[in-house]
Amino acid sequence: MAAKRYGPVDGKSRSGLADYHQSKDELAGLPQTVAEKIPVTNTPNIFSYKAYVFAKNPALVQRYIKATKADVGGVGGHVVAAEEVKSIIAKFVLDNNGYRGEPMFTSFIVTHTGDDVGVTGIMSEAIPMSVVDELMWDALQEGAGKAAELGLYGPGQDLVADAFTGNLRGAGPATVALPFPVRQDNASQTVLASFADKTEPMAFNYYATGAYMLPRFNTGLIIAASKMKRGYIMDIVDLDTKAQAIEAGAHPRDQKALDGKMEELAKGLQEKVIRLRSPEDLYDIEGLTRSSRFVIARIWSRDEKGEADQLGYVVSAERLHNIKTKKGFTYGGKDDPVLLAFAQGDWPAPGEITSPWASCPMVAGDCRGSHNLHILPMPINSQTSYWSGPILSAVTLSCNIHTGRIGAISDQFALGTPWDQVRKQAGELAIQFRLAHGVKQPATLHEDELEYQEGWKERRARLERQFRVAPPLTFGNGNGHHGGRTANAGRGAGRPDEID
């Protein structure tokens, strides 16, 4: 096995807690301003590397915020991540958070949304992204091992690649990185991190087409003096490589030809993408993003000439049926995406970004990944319920981009806020819709999008063999081979078309 490129310089694993400032201890030794607290959210603990956080003269370097999320085993099926699994993942990162004597993450948190575990942290350009991806892959593998030990459901479910091959794209976990601006005067940067479980990347289109395009969600588009008034530039990615393969000539019933063409399309980790502008191309953007196939993967601010300037929005936009495993190409799920977006300044405020969810839109996913259902905006570190979702969480991180520290966190869907009313409404709509339609469309997805298809494929193939080709059933043609009265019997001569 190849030597690891990360970890302590001496190669000896150790507990890294002594090197870290933990946010849970930030009030130690200070006067307490409240006697009791009413818990409204499960706020994540922030691990920040002391040597960097408290540096007197931090270097102005390119830093990135990186978020990685995967289902490595759930409690009670696909309900919630186990705290022990999260802690094992955190411990592995803390023990191995080094590259050539420097920390890979200067600050990070470990969270969960439903049964998906997420690691979100700040890194610098000095750390190769492939090394961080390797650390994340191995940390999630450790979590999967603990999930197996605990008897959790689906240990390592999202780790679908056979082994780490250089990056996490196409390996199963959802991962994105967003470069921070490099500036001298203002070290503050607000980042919104959103995690979705039991749904697909298309769900995040509601963020993009709402807060970044429509003034009813974001008044800043009209009244702000920042770059926001120029609109935004959007990269929209075609995620359906199966459809692309068919359009390229592969027969939809020829699995070998489909897999071959999909593999060809996936080579080089390339994507099929179109760049459109808002507000000029609003109708085209809305038209493309109405389906699961097309996802707004990146959003850029615009300079004085109207061209792409600062990247401020990224989504883990890929489909798991691109992934080659021992079983060949497989469609492994609705992808459970992650999003990173800048907020404030040239970007929408956090409440503007999240506001489209107040209308309780429906997304694909839910139980068995095979339904359309109203998404439930939940506080971070919440479990699924009512079948199994889909759910969404969103937190804002106040980041110091000079020191690489996550200074504080707020939960955008916290308890005790108007989102309680949204959750109530979404829950009522979901119950009515799910029970009214059951297995029938539009509650269930088209058969090509059903996540667990094998049972349906067998049933469909068996029934297909029982179909027969025969003349359509007709009446009143004089053949008499159907017997009984014809449709016109008793109506009288000369009135064959009269309707009672």
Image: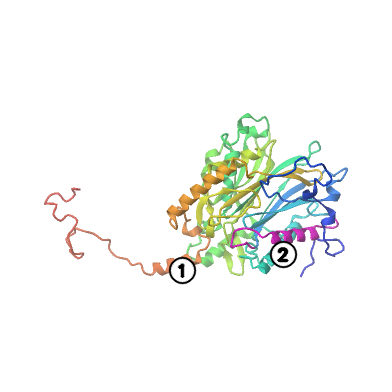
Q: Quadrant of the N terminus?
A: bottom right
Query: Disc 1 or 2, which lies upstream in sequence?
Result: 2
The residue shown at (54%, 45%) is 424
Q: Mark 1 touching mark 2, by CB under 8 A?
A: no
Residue 316: assigned label:
none
Q: Is residue 83 shown in magenta?
A: yes
Q: Position of residue 399 (x, y in %)?
A: 75, 43
Q: Amino acid at mark 1?
A: Glu
Residue topped by disc 1: 458
Compared to residue 78, the image places residue 274 above or below, namely above
Gap in Å between the C-alphas at discs 1 and 2?
A: 36 Å
> For the residue carrying disc 2, how many other residues have a C-alpha within 10 Å: few (<14), some (14-19), or many (20+)?
many
The residue shown at (70%, 63%) is 143
Q: Position of residue 341 (x, y in %)?
A: 67, 44
Element marked by disc 2? helix
Horizontal arrangement in the rendering, residue 460 relative to residue 55 (left or right): left
Looking at this view, is 276 or 320 the one in front?
A: 320
The residue shown at (46%, 68%) is 458
Compared to residue 34, the image places residue 273 above or below, namely below
Q: Is residue 346 shown in magenta?
A: no
Element marked by disc 1? helix
Q: Amino acid at mark 2?
A: Glu
Looking at this view, is 204 or 361 the one in front?
A: 361
Span of residues in magenta: 73-101
Residue topped by disc 2: 142
Q: Position of residue 377 (x, y in %)?
A: 59, 47
Asked if residue 264 shows in the view, the reply is no
